[in-house]
Amino acid sequence: MAKTHYKLIILGGGPAGLTAGLYAARARMDHLFIEKGAEGGQILLTDWVDNYPGFPEGISGFDLAEKMSAHAKRFDLNSMFGNVISMDLSEPVKRLELEDGGSLTCNALIICTGARPRPLGIPGEKELTGKGVSYCATCDAPFYRNMHVAVIGGGNTAVQEAAHLTKFADKVTLIHRRDELRATKILQENAFDNPKINFIWNSNATKIQGTDGVEELHLRNNDGEESILKVDGVFVLIGVLPNNEMLPLESLKADDGGFIPTDLETRTAVAGVYAAGDIRSKEVRQIINAAGEGATAVLAAENYLINLS
Ligand code: NAP
């Protein structure tokens, strides 16, 4: 019979989970790493990573994900593909239910389920997703060769991916709801210097229109004036929502946004349960701190497990 109990389960395979996996495997802990899709999480949505130490020339998101995965596997990461749909954290032995009907138990759990792009929630967005509305410039930019695309958002993702889009599109119009970007200064400078990027400030998208693909983006500025932008694609890059559907949010005392608060050692409100990476309630969501939190979580879990036995 296949093993179903582990001392430690790591749930989610982005930078936090892969680093936790590396540390757990290297410490020879009795562990299981569970990922439901491709390892790498949101780095797979990033064209180029320019601020991860050790890669002075930068590295593509895809390559960094592959390296993190290969690194953990070098120490015999014990991994499985599976979709955890619910869990019971009320007892010292935690129980995870899988979509295929199976269940797994563990003494310590590290939640690294990450986050996903936030939708705008405007008419036309859902209907045209995959037909011109996209949440991933890295994935879809090549479809827009010589075209005009809109990017919505003013954070690091929007500004960085707008620059990536200019490798393909003729024109990129970035629409931001304020008159100042939130993105890191160096990304802002690059965007302002890029002749293919123009900006529409103080404006919100109200509707996306088109029959077989995106044709128009309807905007309203902060003075209430309406306008229509003719575009071939709309990239919605306005932040993230937590991947928390499988989590008992009340026991974990999730914050108002559904992210999981922890202490500095990544301990959640439930003994033996840790959260690392973008699912954590925090201000800074960078690959480097996700990885750091994954390492911290394993060390904290290891201490917890030692004190249990
Ligand atoms: P973010 O930093 O939360 O920025 C979201 C942007 O979207 C903000 O400019 C916000 O406007 C705007 N926005 C939010 N809701 C909106 C709405 N309903 N309509 C219109 N605009 C809306 O999100 P992010 O850029 O996706 O980044 C997520 C995290 O990943 C951040 O911690 C970021 O630093 C990190 N990241 C880092 C890098 C890097 O270091 N190179 C790259 C990508 C992402 P306001 O400014 O008005 O709030």
Image: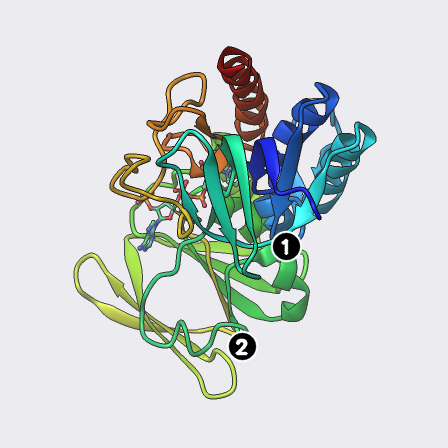
* Badge count: 2
Q: Residue at x 29, y 58 (%)?
A: 203
Vertical arrangement, residue 198 with respect to residue 207, above or below: above
Quarter assignment of residue 141: bottom right
- Left or right: 36, with 225 as reference point: right
| Amino acid type, callout 2 | Lys
Q: Which of 51 and 159 is in front in this view?
A: 51
Does residue 23 appear anywhere in the picture?
yes
Quick one: which residue is furthest to the right in this view?
74
- Left or right: 40, with 267 as reference point: right
The residue under label 2 is 131
**Label 1 – label 2 distance at C-alpha:** 23 Å
Q: Where is residue 106 in the image (x, y as percent from the top left)?
A: 54, 34
Q: Residue at x 32, y 65 (%)?
A: 121
Find ligand 1 in the image and state its quadrant.
top left
Badge 2 local density, few (<14 within 10 Å), some, or many (20+)?
some
Q: Nearer the viewer, residue 127 or 34?
A: 34
Q: Which of 225 and 257 is in front in this view?
A: 257
| Amino acid type, callout 1 | Gly
Q: Is mark 2 on a helix, strand or loop?
A: loop
**Label drawn at residue 120:** none
The residue under label 1 is 37
